[in-house]
Image (cartoon, rainbow, N blue to C red):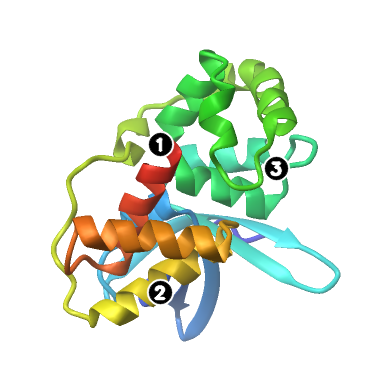
């Protein structure tokens, strides 16, 4: 099993990225919370990974720190929560916010995430409550979504918009919802990068 990757960040196309490790390019799916922490393309990066082996594929999921990976591994043990939904949850809500939602039994915050209905939200709260006691959240503040946006991107706005919409669809949002939320985010943050648009759109949908 591959538990960690360290190498050059070759590509960033949320929620997927490619890391060159000694000449081998590893395709990795990462949560948006992890994407916000990544350096620019061409820089060195270290990710903690979880490998899923299926009959038709071998998939790698990457995380900026062990805390998020541990939460991912706990989530996929919950009935009805697979790797894709777990990644969607960790993209739409921070580790800290998820913990608070479980502790406060806030099903409303969870059902705003795509793929999480009322029954799934209730199951997450019931089954995760005891499991969260084993976690050490020393780094959770790194993943809290903020109002501040990073530097303006240099790429074309249309490309940023298309990439942002594609990322939301890959995370489980409906195309119409993705287009609408990204358009609103772009209106509020003209010239923003695709990652900044995704961040703003996710925050608006989850907190709305």
Q: Are marks 2 and 3 in contact (CB under 8 Å)?
A: no
| Residue 6 at least partly seen | no
Kindly identify which numbered label has been placed on residue 41: none
Q: Quadrant of the C terminus?
A: top left
Viewer-nearest of discs 1 and 2: 1
Comparing 159 with 39, the one in front is: 159
Whole-number angstrom distance, CA of label 1 to CA of label 3: 26 Å
Please name the residue that numbered disc 1 is placed on: 208
| Residue drawn where x is 37% and y is 32% of the image | 140
Q: Earlier in the sequence, mark 1 or mark 2?
A: 2
Whole-number angstrom distance, CA of label 2 to CA of label 3: 27 Å
Comparing 179 with 201, the one in front is: 179
| Residue drawn where x is 55% and y is 42% of the image | 113
How many C-alpha atoms fall within 10 Å of the one at disc 1: few (<14), some, or many (≥20)?
Answer: few
Q: Is residue 153 left or right of residue 162?
A: left
Percent of width and height locating residue 28: 53, 67
Q: Are marks 1 and 2 in contact (CB under 8 Å)?
A: no
Q: Are marks 1 and 3 in contact (CB under 8 Å)?
A: no
Q: Is residue 103 left or right of residue 192?
A: right
Vertical arrangement, residue 75 with respect to residue 200, above or below = above
Viewer-nearest of discs 1 and 3: 1
| Residue drawn where x is 71% and y is 22% of the image | 127
Please name the residue that numbered disc 3 is placed on: 76
Please name the residue that numbered disc 2 is placed on: 163
């Amino acid at each position: 099993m591959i538990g960690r990757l360290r190498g050059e960040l070759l590509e960033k196309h949320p929620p997927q990225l490619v890391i060159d490790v000694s000449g081998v390019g590893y395709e990795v799916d990462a949560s948006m919370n992890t994407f916000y922490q990544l350096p620019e393309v061409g820089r060195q990066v270290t990710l903690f990974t979880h490998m899923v082996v299926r009959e038709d594929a071998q998939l790698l999921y990457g995380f900026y720190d062990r805390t998020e990976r541990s939460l991912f591994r706990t989530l996929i043990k919950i009935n009805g929560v697979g790797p894709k939904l777990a990644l969607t949850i960790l993209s739409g809500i921070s580790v800290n916010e998820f913990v608070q939602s479980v502790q406060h039994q806030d099903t409303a915050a969870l059902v705003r995430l795509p793929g999480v209905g009322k029954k799934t939200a209730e199951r997450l709260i019931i089954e995760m409550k005891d499991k969260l006691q084993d976690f050490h959240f020393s780094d959770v503040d790194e993943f809290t979504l903020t109002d501040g946006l990073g530097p303006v991107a240099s790429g074309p706005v249309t490309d940023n918009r298309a990439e942002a919409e594609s990322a939301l669809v890959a995370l489980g949002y409906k195309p119409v919802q993705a287009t609408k939320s990204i358009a609103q985010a772009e209106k509020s943050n003209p010239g923003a990068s695709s990652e900044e648009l995704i961040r703003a759109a996710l925050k608006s949908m989850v907190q709305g």
